[in-house]
Amino acid sequence: MRNIAALLMLFFCTFVLAQERFVAGTASAARGEKAYGAIEVPAGVDAALTIPLVVANGAKPGPVLALVSGLHGTEYSSIIALERVIERIDPARLSGTVIIVPLVNINSFEQKVPHVNPIDHKSMNRFYPGKIDGTQTERASFFITKEVVDRCDHLIDLHGGDLDESLRPYSYWPLTGNAMQDRMSREMALAFGIDHIIISADRPKDPAASRYLDNTANTRGKASIAVEAGYAGTTETDDIEMLANGCFNVMRYFKMLPGNPTFVQNPVWLENVQSVTSNANGIFYPLVRRGTYVQKGMKIGFLTDYVDRPLADFVAPVAGVITFIRAVPSMTKGETVASIGIVAAKSPSD
């Protein structure tokens, strides 16, 4: 009987220890620990990929929050922001667990290729929930879904202006139709602290065709948001701190850190975003800056050929705020010139 009791006690202790330890990818952290590891994406039709991650497992139990950046590897401000979060997060003060994936698109980062993964020329934020037998981007999306999305309760997808994008900071508030989930994601966006918030009601609703990372979590019933701060590949301190501090304030909102969260008091809700595209190749000259409020019909830029002959004028199709304007002179047919957020007539109710 004593041997049986000892075995039962050993089993119980092992079970409790397993429950207390949090594993994501190859990172395994006990309570109060910060562990480093990776998501290993095996080779398939193209090369394997190792995506680094960190698990901060709090001294006390609580929610699991995932923070991901670098789906576009030259959106540097968001990547550096999560490096700062890794540096500053203290598991001893944390209730719950934070999974941090600071750089997904390593090939883009190392080769300085905007927008896509240069291995398969696909955006790493367009193929979720992924395919285990697909190209590198699709396989990476599959394993991020498995190792990050499926293991978290909430997720924040961080972005910043890519090399050719001059954008003002904004968040996305995704609408799923689930009132409780939508209320929570709204409060997450307000807690994150960016004062311009795009109401995103047009995301796919099918979990098997979720497309975007934050939407992959939302279609699985996990209130999540996406945020943007940074422009033209820069690493301005204000943008980095806005993103890093936003992550910590959302942790306070979820009671993962001590202290009261702060919320945006007078948010600007953008009910829709309309884009202007170019119908020709040429040299682009902007006439407005990111964050400028424009009227319908206002000239926002123009295009010339390569010997300074006029090709096109670009005008605002609607009144609103310039959320994005092209940051470089290079322009090709079909590319986005600018995006304009239409300010909602009234604040959406909570």
Image (tube, helix red, strand yellow):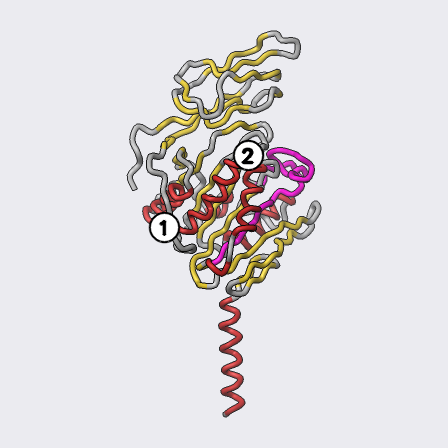
N-term-proximal mark, 2 vs 1: 2
Please state which of residues 83 and 222 is positioned toward the viewer in this rendering. 83
Identity of the residue drawn at 55% across and 46% down:
84
Residue 145 percent location from the top left of the image: 53, 51
| SS label for mark 2 | loop
Which residue was labeled with disc 1? Answer: 260
Answer whether residue 127 is visible to the viewer in this image.
Answer: no
Identity of the residue drawn at 42% across and 55% down:
256
Find out whether residue 101 is within the magenta segment: yes
Residue 235 percent location from the top left of the image: 57, 35
Badge count: 2
Crowd rating for badge 1 (residues with CA inside 10 Å; few <14, some 14–19, many 20+): few
In the picture, the quarter occupied by the C terminus is top left
Left/right of residue 103 with respect to residue 299 in the rendered view: right
Q: Which residues are magenta?
A: 97-124
Which residue was labeled with disc 2? Answer: 236
Q: Amino acid at mark 1?
A: Asn
The kind of secondary structure the magenta stretch mainly shows is loop
Question: 15 above or below 37?
Answer: below
Q: Amino acid at mark 2?
A: Glu
Tell me how far mark 2 sits from mark 1, CA to CA: 27 Å
